[in-house]
Image (spheres, grey):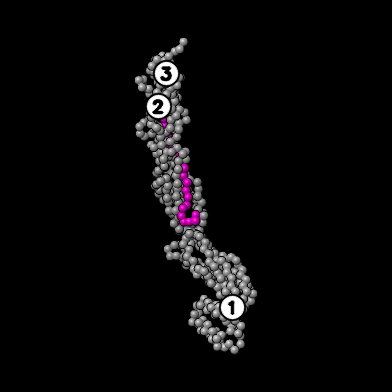
Amino acid sequence: ITVVAAAPTAISAVSGSGQSTPIGGTFTAPLTVKVTDAYGNANGGVTVTFAGPASGAGLSPASAAKTTGTDGIAALTAIANGSASAGTYSVTASVAGVSGAATFVLSNTSASSRTTVAQVAPLPVSAGTGTNVPTTFVATLSDATQNSAGLPTGFVQFYNGGTVLGAPVAVANAQAVLQTTFPVAGLYTMTAQYLGDANFAGSSSSTLVIVVSNPAYTISLSPTSLTISGGGNASTTLTITPTGNYQGTITYTCDGLPQFSACTFSPVAVALTGTNVPQTVVLTVYTLGPGNTQGRSGVSAAGLALVALLVMRRRKLLPGLMVLLLAGGTVLGLAGCGTRHYYTPVGADSVTVQAVGVGTAGSGSPDLNRSATFTLNVQ
C-alpha cells in the first residue's frame, strides 16, 4: 500500500531557534522546519520560504527558499547580516497556501574586534624617541572573527601605563591617530583601547614599549690608527650617531697633530635633522716629507699647499700668507744657499677629533660637544 500525502496544511519549527552569532557569522545549527498534510503525513518537494527583517539586524540574504525532502524537512543554514547593528529578531518559514508560519528567534551579537598600536614617527621607530619630541602613534582596528562585518567605528582611548593620554580619538578608516610628547627620559608602555560600537565589541592592544632618551649624539672613528709615510696621507671615517632625535649642526677639528701636518673633513659640517640616522664624514690627514718636497728647492707646490692649509686652519691667514711668500722666496731666490726641509716628524701621536654641536633652536636639542681619538703613526 502506498500512502500519498494530501496537500500541505501545516508547517512547524523543528530546531534552530534561540541561537546567537556575531555579526557576519554563521549560526551553528540550521533553521529546520517540517511540512505535513492534515493527517500528519510528510510533504516532500514543497517550497519553504525563510524570511527575516528587511532592514536592521537580520539574515544575509534577508530571505531564501528551500525545498522539503521526502521526510517533509527543509533546512536553512543562516548567516547573520554584517550591514546592520547587533540585535534580536524573528525569522519566519512559510509555505504558499498554508496558513500560519514557523517562527525562529535569533540574535546577531557584536563582532569581536582586534586592536594593535604602533609608533609611526619619528623614524626610524627602532631608535625610540627623544624627550619633548612630537611622537605619533596609530591604533589599527580589524574584525577578529573575519566575518565581513565591515570596519570598526567609534573611538580609541590611548594610555601610557595606567595614565589616560588625552580624550578618546575618533576612528577613521579603522584607524585612530595620537600625537604626544614625553618630557622625561625613560621607558614608557603604550596601549590603545577600542571602545566598541554597535557592530563590534571593544578590545585592547598589547603593550608597546617606548624608549625615550634625551637628544644627543656620539662620535666614533674607524680605523682608530693611521700609518703614513712622510709626505703621504691617509683617511679614517668619523661616524656621528644621533639619539633621542637630536637636531643640530655638527662641525669638527683635529687637536694634537704633529708639526707640518694637517687634517681635512668632508663634508665640512653635518646637519642632524631628528631622524636618528647616523652620518659619516671622511677625515684625511696630510703630512710633509720626501714625497712632497724637492731637495735644494726646499718646499714643493704640494708642500706650500699644505703649509697654507695648516695656516688657514689655525685662522692666521695673513701671517700664514707671509710665511708662504717667504718660503716661496727662499725656494725661488735662494736656491744656492743650501737646502731647507719641512718634514712632519716621525713618530706616534694621539690626535683628538673635537666635534661641536649647535642644537637647532626650538627643537629641544642642546649644544653638545663630543670627542674621539686616533693614533697617527708617521714613518
Circle number at residue 292: 1
Q: Quadrant of the C terminus?
A: bottom right
Which residue sits at x=61%, y=77%? 291
**Residue 90 visible in rendering:** no
**Mark 2 residue element:** strand
Which stretch did the figure color magenta?
A: 102-125
Number of numbered discs visible in the structure rendering:
3
Locate residue 111 relative to residue 264 in the image: left or right: left
User: Disc 1, disc 3: CB below 8 Å?
Assistant: no
Q: Of 63 and 84, which appears nearest the observer?
A: 63
First in residue order: circle 2 vs circle 1: 2
Residue annotated with mark 2? 65
Amino acid under disc 3: Asn
Spot occupied by residue 33 in the image (x, y as percentages of width and height): 43, 23
CA neighbours of label 2 inside 10 A, class few (<14), some (14 to 19), many (20+) = some
Amino acid under disc 2: Ala
Which residue sits at x=48%, y=56%? 123
Spot occupied by residue 46 in the image (x, y as percentages of width and height): 40, 21
**Mark 3 residue element:** loop
Which residue sits at x=57%, y=72%? 285
Amino acid under disc 1: Asn
Q: CA distance from mark 1 to mark 3?
A: 113 Å
| Residue placed furthest toward the top | 1
CA neighbours of label 3 inside 10 A, class few (<14), some (14 to 19), many (20+) = many
Residue annotated with mark 3? 43
First in residue order: circle 2 vs circle 3: 3
Q: CA distance from mark 2 to mark 3?
A: 16 Å
Residue 22 in the image: above or below residue 74 = below
